[in-house]
Image (cartoon, helix red, strand yellow):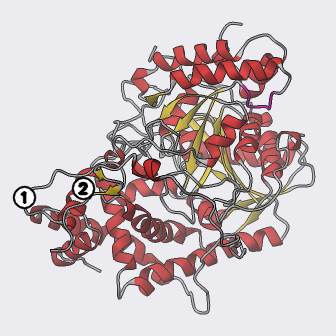
Amino acid sequence: MSDLMKLTLAGARDALRAGETTAVELTEASLAAVAASKPLNAFVHDTSEIARSQAKAADLRIQAGDAPDMCGLPIGMKDLFCTKGVATQAASAILDGFKPEYESTVSQKLFDAGAVMVGKLNMDEFAMGSSNETSVYGNSVNPWKVDERELTPGGSSGGSAAAVAAETCLAATGTDTGGSIRQPAAFTGITGIKPTYGRCSRWGIVAFASSLDQAGPITKDVRDAAIMLEAMCGFDAKDSTSMNLPVPNFEAALTGDIRGKTIGIPKEYRVDGMPDALETLWSEGRQMLRDAGAIVKDISLPHTKYALPAYYVIAPAEASSNLARYDGVRFGHRAKLEAGDGITEMYEKTRAEGFGSEVQRRVMVGTYVLSAGFYDAYYNRARRVRALIKKDFDDVFAAGVDAILTPSTPSAAFGLGEMADADPVQMYLFDVFTVTVNLAGLPGISVPAGLDSKGLPLGLQLIGRPWEEGDLLNTAFALENALGFNAKPTQWWR
Amino acid sequence: MSIDTKTAGRVAKLARIKVEEADLPALAQEFTNILGFIEQLNEVDVEGVEPMTSVTPQRLYRRDDAVTDGDQQAAVLANAPDAREGFFAVPMVVE
């Protein structure tokens, strides 16, 4: 078969089962595409040896008729997932040389399902960023290009999005703390879903903000998102916040029938300076869902405006606590010490050398909001506001809304380096539509909707009820069918 | 609220991140900007609202108090920058 990398997960799965290709062929095609994608800087750790042995094993399983959906399919793994014996750095200098002695639950589940890991993927350092510009490996680059500028693939799962949009692997893992799956998916014209908090085990995923972090897939389309999400989900005794619920067959939920479903349009998601193309796509999306038989109605989520400031208290607070473990003692980098340096100097020098500036900034903001005298004023207030943000959603769901339609991001991808001199707060604003979903623990999916005036992709987001990813995926499937987005970037990097 | 260089230095110390004296004014300015952004939260009426601890109303489940793992000394120490005789090695802590 030619152009194996143009296949979706579903297409490749079906081709494997029909004997039209093999896992080894697919994997070699993927590894060749990975090798040809160096200018995108999406892949940062080579796992080709592992991939080749996994592919051989997958072919045996397929021949034996014991092939789960993901069996033999080449995927990329975000550098945030601990992979046994394979460098895992969370794109940080402080984890230089770290090779975990264990496998994360999500990557293990994917491997158990027969998936093939073709490489580890670039990201923002410790998943803190919206542009993949805080990575120790350097920027990852968006495959979409409309002029001489190189564009950000978004962040923090920027390498994952770039790799899938560039068709170097069939899908990739991502993680989402404030939008890190959905925003890069939108910036690169592909699909990404963050499931309900507790669906995917966080065990073995380098922690950023534990009450917000969730893993999810970044894929070419909604069907693939359903297939891969199902393989990643499930109860895990090693994560105390993992939910003990059966995992439904998400792909079977994709009927495309959304007649009678109620879709809410939140008025608070209309922000100043939103590009006309986005406004148009959003209203077209509303009309398409209505045409498909859904009831579309205006709703209000009154505390939306306070989601970003609440997030920028809660996430740094949790990060400052989680990242305390990087002290130069048990793993990763330790600073060279001078005569007379004691343990405090060791901590301070190690962390100053090992953490990049955005990570340092967030750890220190977190330290401040948790410090004596400010804990109530900042941290507890933010947690109260978070409760109100969740209540906004609870109220609309209780009033019969099944899903909420919003833009995924306030604009299309920007140029790498363009935000370098901006206030950090300006960068934070790219997460304005996604961060509410993490604070409320809900599932959210971004689907590619169309192109802006310059020809860059824009995404629409659907937010679902907790634990109803199947229903959410089906609504996204109906929207995807109606939108008919099929634009691809030209392969300028080859 | 404006953060002065003394406070910025104290926060850096608490976070165990070495920040050069010369870099403190810029850091203090960044903190001021970010906290200014955060202070919008003061507009919200949170009277009677409990701080959220978990998005899912579930009680953390318990497991039996039993040993489930062990004999992993080599794996535990494998990534240590300095490990000696089965221990993590650090600069002298007690004189």
Q: Which residue occupies the foreground of this view, A443 or A286?
A: A443
Q: Is residue A483 magenta?
A: no
Indicate whether A122 appears above or below A57. below
Residue A10 pos. (x, y %): 77, 27
Q: Chain of mark 1?
A: A
Q: Which residue is mark 2?
A: A350
Where is residue B10 drawn, in percent x and y? 22, 76
Asked if residue A129 can be seen in this view, the reply is no
Q: Secondary structure at mark 1?
A: loop
Left or right of A207: which side holds A92? left
> Which residue is painted at 58% across and 47% down in the image?
A104
**Residue position marked by numbered label 1 in the rendering:** A339
Compared to A20, does A416 lie above or below? below
Quarter of the N terminus of chain A within the rendering = top right
Residue A62 located left or right of residue B80: right
Q: Nearer the viewer, residue A488 or A216?
A: A216
